Image: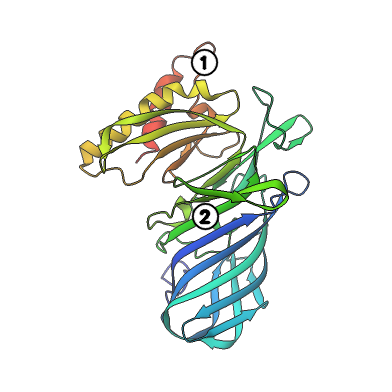
Amino acid sequence: MASSDREILSTDIQAKNYSISLKNLELGGNFKYDGTVKIDLEVRNPTKTIVLNAVQLQLKSARVYAPGGTELSTTSFSQDDANQRVSISFDSEIPSVADAVLEIEFSGTMNADMAGFYRSAYKPAETPVPSVPKVGENYYMFSTQFESSDARRAFPCFDEPNLKATFDFEIEVPKDLVALSNMPEKGTRDGADGRKIVSFERTPVMSTYLLAWAVGDFEYIEDFTRRKYNGKQLPVRVYTTRGLKERGRWALEHTHTTVDFYSDIFQIDYPLPKVDLLAVHEFTHGAMENWGLITYRTTAVLFDEKNSDPSYKNRIAYIVAHGKL
């Protein structure tokens, strides 16, 4: 559908929930991964073609399931690189239904572009756990940056801010690494080759650019809001790569006070069950306000009491507060 100044996706198909599963993370070499996304759809008009966003992804197969026994499959994909879209074509028509499911198998790359699902190089403050990948003198952590339209680099999706949905997310990682996402951990089960699969609670309805996840040799410091939300104080954590967590004390102190202050001043309770801050070693922004997992440039969230310039305290307090809005 075209507006006067831009092309946007058709509203004939509306995503309601994404279930994303990532596995086979190649921690080194080409840094590839495999994924499956199952998208709960409302199909408002019958169609043989679904158009969504995907860039730098390899789509392998797609299936649609609809009530009444409808099951369609295809490997027919037409990539529009200029508009970062892919058209998925089926031989038969998908009926107009309120509860279809589109399942896509795909693969991607944990790139070095600081966009999508990407890798950050760093020099460790302490010896990392064995599974942390190393190339030359650099070790790596992994995180996402989806604003404003880079979720499409990590998984196929309807990647426009107005096309909101809920999200279920799980990822298979080595057992000595930590996986994070917007919501609290739901559970852990055994994966392939001695790895674990970490799953997370379903998010509220939100735009694709607010979805986030991260994998690495992380540790954290913790505090709690002084105010109660739904009868509970909320956990507030600052995550860093190993050996840096104590530098997050100043940010931690200002996080719980800011959450409580905003909830009082706007008379709207903070809506999520946790507040995580993550220091990312390579980052294009000062911070990114992913719901429940706010990512920061290291210099915007970490303060070394012995070596940092005291003036940075004001900057950190400001950026921590900005990330909650």
Residue 144 visible in the snapshot: yes
Amino acid on which disc 2 is placed: Phe
User: Alpha carbon of mark 2 to alpha carbon of mark 1: how far?
Assistant: 37 Å
Residue 19 at x, y percent in the picture: 51, 61
Residue 98 lies in what quarter of the image?
bottom left
Which residue in the structure is indicated by mark 1? Answer: 308
Closest to the observer, 53 or 6 = 53
Q: Secondary structure at mark 1?
A: loop
Q: Which residue is mark 2?
A: 169
Mark 1 surroundings within 10 Å by alpha-carbon count, few (fewer than 14), some (14 through 19), many (20 or more): few
- Vertical placement of residue 31 versus 62, above or below: above
Q: Residue at x 38, y 35 (%)?
A: 235
> Amino acid under label 1?
Ser
Assign the N terminus to one quadrant of the image. bottom left
Residue 51: image quadrant is bottom right
Residue 206 appears left or right of 121: left
Q: Is residue 298 above or below residue 212?
A: above
Residue plotted at (53% across, 24% down):
245
Give the residue at the far top of this rendering: 306
Q: Position of residue 299 (x, y in %)?
A: 52, 27
The x, y position of residue 127, in whole percent, is 69, 24
